[in-house]
Amino acid sequence: MSNRLAQARRERGWTQERLIHALRETARIHNRELPASASLKRRIAAWENQGKGISEQYVELLSEVYGRTPFELGLVAEVEAPVVELESIPTFTRLDDGLVGLLHDQTHNIRLMDRRLGGDAIFRQTRAHVDQIESLLRYAMPGTHREAAADALSQAAALAGWQALDNGRLDEAWQLHETAVRAARESGVAAELGYARAQQAYVLIDAGEHAAAHQLISAARAEAASSVPGALTAWLLAAEGESLAHLGDRDGALRALDAAADVMPDVPDDELPYVMLDAGHLARWRGNCLARLGETSAIDDLTSALQAMGEGQYGRAEVSLRVDLALAFRARGDLTEARLHARRANELAGRTGSQRQRRRIKDLLVA
């Protein structure tokens, strides 16, 4: 070790005094104090002859002065490179049709309970379901089964996102819809992507970002174009109509709703279990938009939709419909009917845990 340090000084043609000068200049740059030259000279001799007793401070200074590493100067012993253990090999998921089918079935069962009970009662179950699919997908082998599982994740995350929105958890609702969008992109299913993106816009609506919500829904509809089933095209048009109603654009909202009615198929699409849209639902949607715009003509559409729906069949949807009816009756000046529907909506909202509708009902009951 010591010979390397002495050799470094000889190669530069330095005397001990020249080395001491270089050490002082380097120490001054780093605001360090060095002892007298006589003391340094004795230390240099000991270092070069014995290679021992060199403190960390002088190792750093000598390395900087000579422009070499401590090992190259013989100031430290060579350290063997540590043996790097390979990380444990993950347990990859081998998906199959049966497993993916079970995931879809579970999502569908949760969806049916959600329509009857509301998201507050089963949100934890839905969230756990989403986490389980994410875990399976994280280590899933490539192939069509992985894409099918991504499709299942998109549907489950969109459902959980809507429940979170209904419960007033806007941040969690946004994140879950982000998961739904990413999964839909991996699945390659255009319908899932369009649905998840448009539904995510409702988080923006509840946050008061109406213009951004309309932009997102319009972009989702334009991207889906003719590559999605007619039922989803109608749903996207109706959603766009609602976003326009929030912006106060009556004519634009009605045009979008008319277009939705024109393209809506006569027979529901079984391939889109997450899209509930028939003539009754579309009438409710139209009534919702008209009620938001303060038009009393919404009453006929909403009353027809309520009769077609039947009490107690769709908890959260009935809450929303009755709130819209209350708004429409209030716009007509019939406060008795407005309060009647608001109270019934309040009762149902208590059962479903819909914080989203409770905010609307509160204004109606105090009016």
Image (spheres, grey):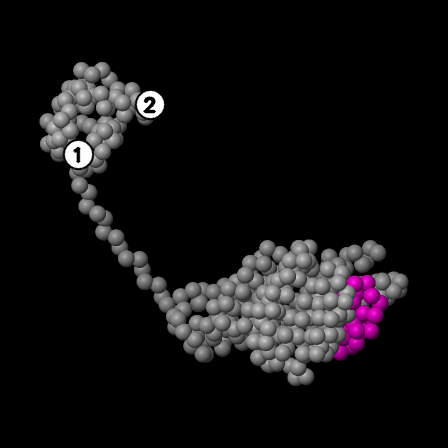
Q: What residue is at 23 percent from the left and 48 percent from the top?
A: 82
SS under mark 1 = loop
Q: Percent from the top left, x then y, of residue 47? A: 15, 26
Give the residue type at disc 2: Asn
Q: Is residue 316 above or below residue 309?
A: above
Q: Percent from the top left, x then y, of residue 248? A: 76, 61
**Span highlighted in magenta in the image:** 289-311
Q: What residue is at 55 percent from the left and 58 percent from the top?
A: 175
Q: Which mark is residue 73?
A: 1
Is residue 110 visible to the viewer in this orientation of the structure?
A: no
Q: Percent from the top left, x then y, of residue 297? A: 83, 70
Q: CA distance from mark 2 to mark 1?
A: 24 Å
Is residue 137 visible to the viewer in this orientation of the structure?
A: yes
Q: Is residue 262 above or below residue 171?
A: below
Instruction: State the image quarter where residue 169 is shown.
Output: bottom right
Front residue (pair 178, 255): 255
Quickly name the residue at label 2.
31
Q: What residue is at 23 percent from the left and 51 percent from the top?
A: 83
Instruction: State the image quarter where residue 59 is shown.
Output: top left
Magenta stretch, main secondary structure, is helix
Q: Is residue 74 above or below residue 226?
A: above
Give the residue type at disc 1: Leu
